[in-house]
Amino acid sequence: MAPESVLEYLAGNEDRFIEELFAYARIPGISAQSDHAPDMRRSAEWLAARCEQAGLVAEIRKTGGNPVVFAKTPKPDPKKPTFLVYGHYDVQPPEPLELWESPPFEPRRAGRNVYARGISDNKGQHLAHINAVEAWLKTGNELPCNVKFLIEGEEEVGSKALYDYLPKHAKELACKALVVSDTEIPGMKHPALCYSLRGMAPSEILLEGPDRDLHSGLFGGAVDNPAMVLCQMLAQLRDKRGKITIPGFYDDVVKLSAYERKQMAKVPFDEKKFRKSVGVAALFGEAGYTPDEQRAARPTFEINGLTSGYQGEGGKTIVPSWASAKITMRLVPDQDPDKIIAMVKKHLKAVCPPTVKLTVTAGQGGGPYMVDPTGPLAQACMRAAKLGFGHECLLARGGGSIPIIAAFKKYLNADTFMLGLALPDDNAHSPNEKFSLDAYMAGMKMAAHLWPELAGVA
Amino acid sequence: MAPESVLEYLAGNEDRFIEELFAYARIPGISAQSDHAPDMRRSAEWLAARCEQAGLVAEIRKTGGNPVVFAKTPKPDPKKPTFLVYGHYDVQPPEPLELWESPPFEPRRAGRNVYARGISDNKGQHLAHINAVEAWLKTGNELPCNVKFLIEGEEEVGSKALYDYLPKHAKELACKALVVSDTEIPGMKHPALCYSLRGMAPSEILLEGPDRDLHSGLFGGAVDNPAMVLCQMLAQLRDKRGKITIPGFYDDVVKLSAYERKQMAKVPFDEKKFRKSVGVAALFGEAGYTPDEQRAARPTFEINGLTSGYQGEGGKTIVPSWASAKITMRLVPDQDPDKIIAMVKKHLKAVCPPTVKLTVTAGQGGGPYMVDPTGPLAQACMRAAKLGFGHECLLARGGGSIPIIAAFKKYLNADTFMLGLALPDDNAHSPNEKFSLDAYMAGMKMAAHLWPELAGVA
């Protein structure tokens, strides 16, 4: 339990915390787009200044890519346990812009929601932790543990620089466990500890046919169509229920246990409401699994983008010169991204006809993650979440990927506990992303309670 | 045979004819792009002025879309037969612009070639006819027939306005036969009369899934991926050899006769050279047909463009909200575009899963065309081509489509004879489209000889 004065401080500073959230959300830190490089730097600078203002000792650290912000509570006590909060200041591209109801980097408040790109994923969530530590420090209460913050700028593009940074700074980052708020909870009445995440294996598939777009009348029939070949190659990788048909793809998948299925079933799910929330007439998914299992505990093959030929107004009667697809596979324990990518490459090569040239470019992937949800640290996290939200904390698996978490285990030998503040309608990665100010405030309370709960069992 | 003075006039005015070709090619008359509407008008105005300058009586006629240019030789003689030359002043979109070696609307001469969008398809080809009639008129020679010109501005987008215009102006356009130079010949030593064209049935297929792009981690596995569904639906419409698998698709296809196959085999074809000319490692096509048969006498299903999800730099881990494909089917006698489109719509509807919403928007199609290549007018055309090019004229089928030709037969009850001036490396519809000045000059000579040859047997 956090002292009353800490909680009062949080409540008393709500307006300022919201203003700071707005300021942070105005910085378009889009890591996927190279013309936003200056905004990555601005994001890190804003964040480091905010940490200093909160009473932390903060530094911007160079990496091979976008910088990381490293901050810690002052005068660390070696007798106390140390915990590390991880987050990311970079955001997804906001496109398609025309679907936003207000500009993605001009935060708009409507009631208890604030709309902006990156505000839920992940700015609001790690700000809540910084605010909570500020409350401990500024009220003169002694934190029962040392707290470190590591906020990076490449999570949305695969955390490449951090993978290099981690082993070199393992000593400085050493901790008993990590806490990450970057996952979804079912609702304000259902906080949840996420004990598993899917991994990710991204690739870009390029098929090159004729050396230019050809007149489909003069050449069509004797020269193959790369767009059609792409469709035919991709079509056979997944069946109509979502089962992936690449040989060996499921070899390393760990079966869901009866206990897990029982716990996951406690998470409320309203199919009609879910369908409506995404605007589809019918759900879909592998036979024998619930929707929550399908989207969190089963691997997937997704096409994220298709590009070929003429995309403008009207038509153009061509055999396109090339066709490409951006794809990502979500992986579950114990699938290995490198092994999966190699499998996909081999399979694509085997099914590619001689009429086109195939190039598969693998992006930065990350392994899936799982931690024992019944251990003492997990239970401490669940108590803190209950205290913050005022409701029992559920157990859940996350469908998303935070690939760096597997690397934390590897290099820091520490487990990661995921206490998300995102709600199901937050539109992460979609137009009109939003963050709930109620989740922001409850998250701060949870974060304030977290340190005594964790320190008590560490 | 045209009088010697006509041929001398053509040779003597070569420089001016080339300058005029340049001026015409500078006008970006892209009918598919609505922001080029003023350029359509400019194209028509330039052309009408050019016809007047050539001694013709020319008018710009309003239609429901882009205007048509109608011109005729002065003082028509009712005792003489009348022929009509058809062409189009509109051009294909020039995209992708980055593949052009010089700007598409700044004609660039290199030796006997001129590079510009629309210069071969179709500006240079109908200008050759105008120049040839000018030579007759300006040298005081009496044309043995009345000649009319109908040059439209929507051929590249389906000739919609002309379909309405034709029946209303059938009397004015009345003619014994039509001549069109808008097809390809195997080379300068192989002029060819094209006696058949493929028809065309274009459509746009849109699949709508979730109402916005979704986070592929949070939703993937339980919400279907419209890009994958599009691939799966398109993939099954064509087999790997190019055979279309839509039930009933080949029902109305007229079998190639032994005579036709024999004539088509006379057209020289060098597979290695052909492969190199388009930059592919392997050809492709329906079993049992030669490449020339595959691309001129067999129907095809082509994807002209694919669009879905994120297409920018880097990646974006989404389930895209929608996916679309632009497609065209090339048809052969006696396939009917409306019947084919209905067949495709029905088939797509049948194979579309309930997880996405399907919309098929049919574009303006056109029927295939065939004329008897052994008749007297066909033979007259072949004599004129031999006189113009100095080589025997072959018989060929064209793989492209000039859909309005079927409408000429219907509304004017007149056959169309196609005497193309485009060479196989002209890059029609592709970047770096070019036109051969040798073909331009030989085409003028052919066009000059055409009227006495046709009038002699009409």
Image: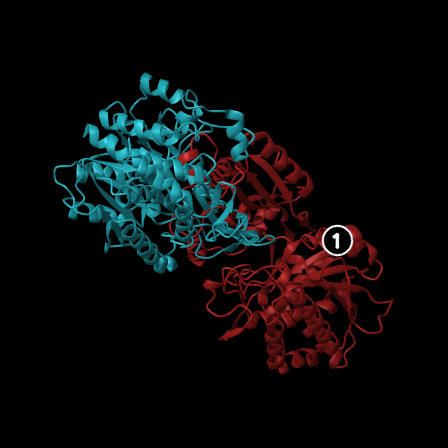
Chain colours: A cyan, B red
Please provide percent x and percent y for residue A9: 34, 42
| Direction from residue B261 to residue A382 in the image, left or right | left
Q: Nearer the viewer, residue B317 or A423?
A: A423
Please provide percent x and percent y for residue B439: 57, 69
Give the residue at mark 1: B163
Question: Can residue A348 be spotted in the picture?
Answer: no
Identity of the residue drawn at 39% across and 35% down: A442
Which residue lies most toward the left here?
Answer: A79
Indicate the quadrant containing the N terminus of chain A: top left, top right, bottom left or bottom right: top left
| Direction from residue B179 to residue A109 in the image, left or right | left
Above or below, A403 against B169 in this view is above
Indicate the quadrant containing the C terminus of chain A: top left, top right, bottom left or bottom right: top left
Please provide percent x and percent y for residue A289: 41, 22
Above or below, A52 against B432 in this view is above
Q: Nearer the viewer, residue B119 or A316?
A: A316
| Direction from residue A83 to residue A6 in the image, left or right | right
Identity of the residue drawn at 26% across and 28% down: A380
Identify residue type, mark 1: Tyr
Please provide percent x and percent y for residue A94: 45, 50
